[in-house]
Image (spheres, grey):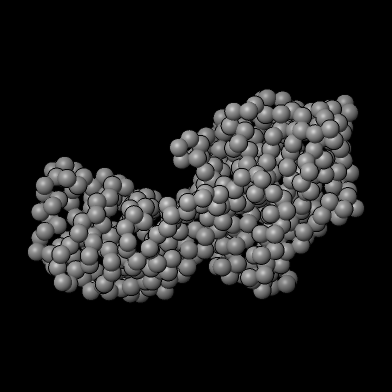
Amino acid sequence: MQYKISTKKITDTDSDCTILAVFNDAESGLAMAGKAASAFDKELGGQLEELLIQGDYTGKLGDTHLVPVFTDSAPQRLLLVGCGDKKSFTEAGLRTATEAAVKALKKTTSVEVVNSLTLETIKGGKAYNIARAVSETTEAALYHYVSTLSKKSAAETSLEQMTILIANAKSALEAKKGAKHGEAIGGGVNLSRELGNLPGNYCTPTFLEETAKKMAKDHAKLSVKVLQEKDMEKLGMGALLSVSKGSREPAKMIIFTYSGGNKSQKPHVLVGKGLTFDAGGISIKPSAKMDEMKYDMCGGASVFGTIQAAVEMNLKLNIIGIVPASENLPDGAANKPGDVVTNMEGITIEILNTDAEGRLILCDALSYAKRFEPETILDMATLTGACVVALGAHHSAVLSKDDSLIKEIMKAGETAHDKAWPLPLTPEYHSQLSTNFADVANVGGRAAGTITAASFLSMFTEGMRWAHLDIAGSAWKEGAAKGSTGRPVPLLCQYLLNLKK
């Protein structure tokens, strides 16, 4: 989709369809036209007002109504979009209304559209944020999974261009920047969603390797290195390699290097769990919903999406992305409960549950990350079912021993509408990982499972400014809307944008 910023009056714009805001009128109970719709209605001789008086349009947030217009000077269509209470119209409401508008427009033959929702009074809205919200939301709403469908027509759309109207000409440059960033972040979200949605027999560790190499070919500032199993053996990555022993698919360690900053700048490292399918190994999972374990690589997918967005935004930062990729399947060579494996730093781990494999591949990746002497390390993983119980789908969990880093991540999540919530990471929980047969056990029992998992990972980030994001509840949706969400790509992108500032 191409995005244009315009300061023209709504009555001076040409398009196949103009998106207009309609609000709730608390007093009459009827819908009321927004500022842009009222201005447009003067050309229509009050036709729009007459339609609203009839009471068929409620102004409920997210409701849409397509209205054909038969005048020489007006567009062929008007799309009325409910924006809720006019006094409390926020950026979140703008995102909801834009998503609804784009989904409605996908069903039409519209090619060029004008979005006038941005002319309404948006609480706390700045030109950059408004334009970014529109383009980011539009990109996400245009996504439709088709890769393994025989009929792909459902994803086809005529939309090619959206003009975003901005009232203040002085804010046009900021709006253009916002639209560019929103498009990049939305594209990163969609890449993450696509990788997550692909089935495990398509999206293998080797497929991720090939995808990463294709990304690097397109961008001069991006390079990719992939460690093969023989390389990991030389480095002593016994924890990661123990997980892949039960699979016929070879493990990969994918390392992105984005050089957007000065050579003297320390990099920021993103580490994402890339379990392309997790059957649980010998500690096999129940068959119900096991198909959803293709999403166990969503942490790794978020690294792919964030790296792509960072490149397209041309961030003046140095960023390392690390994705340890493997499958976890039962086999005669697979890990057994009670086995002891050794991490690349020489730390021994007793495997009490082979389904707690994510922390095994992550611990070697985190140890490897130290060689870059990073400014910060953030890891993302669909790590624990306990996180879903604790926080559901609305917030990702964030854990760190660095309170200031937690605050930075939470602030980024609030700004990006991709929220995170902290859980404690105090020494008391680490005692649950004690064992007689190794330096540490890979699980700490049922209680506080998300915290003990993070406590395990913290052993491999000593001396580092590190935080862990558990995205088990936020990375995908279940039921009729089943699919990857692309989270926490927006949060990570905002975190990097805040560092740039």
Where residue 58 appears, as percent x and y from the top left, is 21, 45
Where residue 449 appears, as percent x and y from the top left, is 67, 30
Where residue 362 appears, as percent x and y from the top left, is 74, 45
Does residue 172 appear anywhere in the picture?
Answer: yes
Does residue 261 appear anywhere in the picture?
Answer: no
Q: State which quadrant residue 44 falls in.
A: bottom left
Q: Residue at x 65, y 49 (%)?
A: 202
Q: State which quadrant residue 269 falls in.
A: bottom right
Q: Is residue 225 left or right of residue 496?
A: right
Q: Is residue 180 left or right of residue 266?
A: left
Dividing the image into 4 quarters, which one contains the C terminus? bottom right
Q: Is 396 rendered above or below residue 321?
A: above
State how many labels appear. Answer: 0
467 and 492: which one is in front?
492
Q: Residue at x 27, y 63 (%)?
A: 18
Q: Is residue 33 left or right of residue 254?
A: left
Q: Is 354 rendered above or below residue 420?
A: above
Q: Residue at x 40, y 67 (%)?
A: 160
Q: Residue at x 20, y 59 (%)?
A: 68
404 and 239: which one is in front?
239
Dividing the image into 4 quarters, which one contains the N terminus? bottom left
Where residue 224 appears, as percent x and y from the top left, is 73, 64
